[in-house]
Image: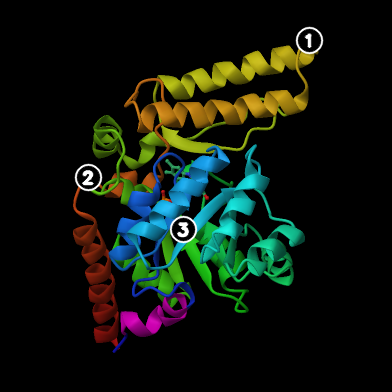
Amino acid sequence: MLKLEDLWSRGESFLGVPYPIIAGAMTWISDSSFAAAVSNAGAFGSVAAGNMPPEMLDEEIQQVKNLTEKPFAVNLITIAPHYRDHLKVAAEHAVPFIVFAGSFPRRPEIQAAKESGAKVMAFASTESIAKHLIDNGVDALILEGSEAGGHVGHVSLGILLQQVLFKIDEVPVFVAGGIATGEYIAHLLLMGAAGVQLGTFFVMTEECGTHPRFKEAFIRARARDAMSTPQISSELKVVAVRALRNKGLDKFNELQVELIEKRRNKEITQAEAQYEVENYWVGALRSAVKDGDVEFGSLMAGQSIGLVDKIRPLKEALDFLIQGAQQELDRISAKF
Ligand SMILES: Cc1cc2nc3c(=O)[nH]c(=O)nc-3n(C[C@H](O)[C@H](O)[C@H](O)COP(=O)(O)O)c2cc1C
């Protein structure tokens, strides 16, 4: 008989939680109270440092520590303006886990995180990047397919599993992107994942403190509504963002045209244009998540939006995943 506890034991002992299900960090959403609620429920919570001032991150980390004794991660965006200070703050707090997102962390940054006592995780998008990160000291990897919400790569999880998961055994590998059922989790574990990371799914919990209109937009949306933004010209590099289509997404395309024009007229530098792009997303996400501007704000969400249609308590959501996974394992066991 296939047992969930056996299949995910590597992830369980690495994260130090009963359920190696990571609620992936979501900027403006994954605050101290949600991170603590997730970890207290037996899964693994994350605090998103996003673009917040370092003093605020300091308070947020202190707050999670007050709210839970369970492990949690602090997610740092390596391209955020306050990134270096964020790393310093997380290290000073000796947080149990640091996740590097955005781009690839450099060796000294990984070392600084490890010296503070943290276990380090980072995103890998190819086998060679995975090996490079492991050589530099990363303790576990996250593979995130382009089905995911937020800033995304170009390759779907199905391909990443074959390109990276099947090749890497040195460290635990957690997989993300498009996950919203226990059945799928069971199969991902059978393929070798140490655990999973979900974002969109967790927005649809009562404990997740977004504006109600943000969640209502999620209830209505179908999988195909979660679109990845196109880069309209090679003159301006744009990291794709997957979000629900609305006027804000159209406005982003206009912003790209505007910035390309300004670049051509030498009114701004490449770095300034790039900054404007990222600044746009941070502001737009905030206005949707916090103020409920679902028309012009950014409704970052993954394609798994098509699989979640109700808001439920966190515990019920986790039970749904865990029971679904075990039932699927029972179904597979019965076949043999
Ligand atoms: C609104 C939103 C904001 C996000 N912000 C971040 C972030 O700040 N850092 C990060 O590493 N990932 C971020 N992500 C990605 C999630 O942590 C997670 O990996 C992703 O949502 C998984 O895919 P799923 O949405 O299909 O479950 C974000 C995702 C969403 C939907």
Please name whichever residue, 234 or 38, is drawn nearer the observer in this view of the structure: 38
- In which quadrant of the rendered image does the C terminus lie? bottom left
Badge 1 amino acid: Asn
Per the picture, the main secondary structure of the magenta-coloured stretch is helix
Return the mark for residue 176: 3
The answer to whether residue 265 is above or below residue 29 is above
In three-dimensional space, the C-alpha distance between marks 3 and 2, rounded to whole angstroms, equals 20 Å
In three-dimensional space, the C-alpha distance between marks 1 and 2, rounded to whole angstroms, equals 47 Å
141 left or right of 26? right
Badge 2 amino acid: Asp
In the image, which residues are magenta? 3-13
Residue at disc 1, secondary structure: loop
Return the mark for residue 310: none
Mark 1 beta carbon near ligand 1 (under 8 Å): no
Which image quarter: residue 270?
Answer: top right
The answer to whether residue 246 is above or below residue 262 is below
Find residue 27 and report its horizontal and vertical position in percent: 46, 42
Sequence-earlier tag: 3 or 1 = 3
- The answer to whether any part of residue 136 appears in the image is yes
Which image quarter: residue 303?
Answer: top left
287 left or right of 253? left
Find residue 201 and report its horizontal and vertical position in percent: 32, 51
Disc 1 marks which residue? 265
The answer to whether residue 51 is above or below residue 202 is above
Disc 2 marks which residue? 309
Mark 2 beta carbon near ligand 1 (under 8 Å): no
306 left or right of 46? left
